[in-house]
Amino acid sequence: MAYTIGVDVGGTFTDVVLRSTSGAISVVKCLSTHYDPIAGIVSGVTRALGDRDPAQVTRVVHATTLATNAVLERKGVRVAYVTTHGFRASVPLGRYARVEEDRYDLRFSPPPPPVAAADCFEVVERISARGEVLTPLDAGSVRHVAAEIARRGIASAAVCLLHAYANPDHERQVAAILRESVPTVVTSSEVWPEIREYERATTTIMSAYIGPLMASYLSRLRDRLAEIGIHAPIHVMESSGGVISADLAAKRAVATIESGPAAGVLAAAGAGFADVISFDMGGTTAKACVVRGGRPEITHEFHVGGKGSFGGRRAGTGVPIKTPAIDLAEVGAGGGSIAWLDAAGALRVGPHSAGSSPGPACYGLGGSEPTVTDANLVLGYLSSASIPLSPSLADKALDRLAGPLGVSREEAAYAVHEIVSASMASAVHVVTVQRGIDPRGFALVAFGGAGPMHAARVAERFGISTVVAPVYCGVASAAGLLAGELSTDRVLSRLDAGDPEPIFAELSAEAAADLGVSPADPEVSVQRSVDVRFKGQSHDLTVEWSDSPEMLASRFFERYRQVYGIAQQGEIELVSYRIRVIVRADEGSSSAGAAGRGTAESGATRAAADPVSPETSEAHPHHPAPRRAYFPELGGYVEIPVHTRDTMGATLPGPAVIEDAESTIVVPPAWTATLTESRAVHLTPGSGR
């Protein structure tokens, strides 16, 4: 028997899914250990293994927010930026869009640049946009810069020369000289050789900024897993939904910035519907993504951080990153989000979270601030599951809001529930309505520890008639990791390229080499695409490649119509060429719906939380007792049935609660829950109380 393990580290919980070659699945949910994330991983993996032989683990796939947190918290390494003479100020000047409250702030100060102006250096050289050498490289200027970087004790350098995508020779020479005295040197032609100088520069800088951290983290993770007997290769989910080796993740750390959120989208894509909205609500954030035709939407540029950006998608906020990523909208709304009153006495929820330490008040771990989890416990939607919950502590926390608001405890709790649902609906709005997509034709696939509790209320706001809570929905991101195929992307901007075949062949060979395969291997597939624009325009759209110019133009015109709502035709030009190399997994060992089809090993799903908590089999009796829950449309608290997937039957009218080991599904009044053959729960508007 062989096993694969998926590990997703979130802001509040660390989720572990173990799957055997027979398809049997065990899951563990434990509190994240922010002082050392690896400690939580090892604890969760040990619990998932139980008495199994760790030597039989053949693969570990990991999603991590390490890169994202390092950028947001500015905890990366100090970086020196090296560019063409005359362009040193491009990064310190940067760009920033004043959005939301910044527009009215007379004392507004833009965020600091990713590299301090004093750490930006110039070398004498110049290459044109067509790759011609206009000014030869002055090696002496490079050696002077290298000496100054070493003198300052800077251990990481990012090299981004003007138009290096068209001719990387100068960058390679600069890197060779710098590496004589600087431990880590990253070049734009290695990371992402695509046009747009500022975005290419920030992408290269971020790779140098977080690369050493990622390399150290993955090395320590490998050592800690080896200590418990796991010597299997470690793969890391990249932002676009593929997985790459730990060594490649260390080299191309910038490709892992959206590692964590991407995994859950893959699980949603395997829910059995062609068109879905992925809705992931965990302890700290909520994320939404559109999947059409079974394929998640992909963006080739996103922004990390920034205000009013719904997860970094609004241009001009945060740090631009030019690598493929699943196109997500994200808001600071999760189970641990803190409810608070602003200076005017208005109720707010988030973006600050209680996280795993001290956690919501009801966890009994020292937290006292009212959170979404506390509100849901007061409303009767929650009970002790993978972690013991204290109703009295939740009551006390919500009273801190109810008093100043002049309302009852349950009214305050429901206000928190409503506000956080509205906040999460804004993320769905960003990826659908704001982009001209009618969400009513989509199924909403809810997962994460808190997602299925709020999903029906979010769906109501858009007229969505189907909500899906897959089996193991509380750990769907970890399960989605096991659906990711080994893959990597490459791009090259080349204006007036003529014959693109040599470009595609070169990119395919480089990408395949990174994965340790050959493009000609039978298990390897190569997907080709190209960035196209109308001649004379600045921005482009990515479409699937075709050898036929007519077909390529037709695909671009259709894509243009989808994005901008305008049917327009004209002369086009090709800008950048893209490939994605995918190594198909063995039949049956990995698929998007694997978690949904899995069976609980030995007849019981394993789940655990804090080390002091009991196993889920004890926390969840076979027939949970009915309890009182608050629904304002029914006049307040009413007694509702509480079921598991084993006891709910084929259909269950609302109001009701369905408890999983790692999540809870709320069936509101006038909704009906249906259990499918795959043990997914479908919620649809129907008869109810």
Image: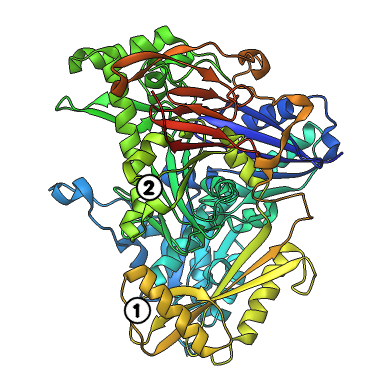
Say whether disc 1 or disc 2 marks the residue closer to the N-terminus: 2
Observer-nearest of 51 and 382: 382
Mark 2 is on which residue type?
Answer: Val
Is residue 187 at all visible to an observer of this figure? yes
Q: Which mark is residue 151?
A: none
Residue highlighted by disc 1: 538
The type of residue carrying mark 1 is Ser
Please provide percent x and percent y for residue 534. Answer: 37, 84
Q: Is residue 43 left or right of residue 336?
A: right
Q: Residue at x 71, y 38 (%)?
A: 598
Q: Is residue 471 above or below residue 144?
A: above
Cα distance between the residues tagged 1 and 2: 29 Å
* Quadrant in which the N terminus is drawn: top right
Toward the viewer: 483 or 452? 452
Per the rendering, the mark at residue 428 is 2
Which quadrant: the C terminus?
top left
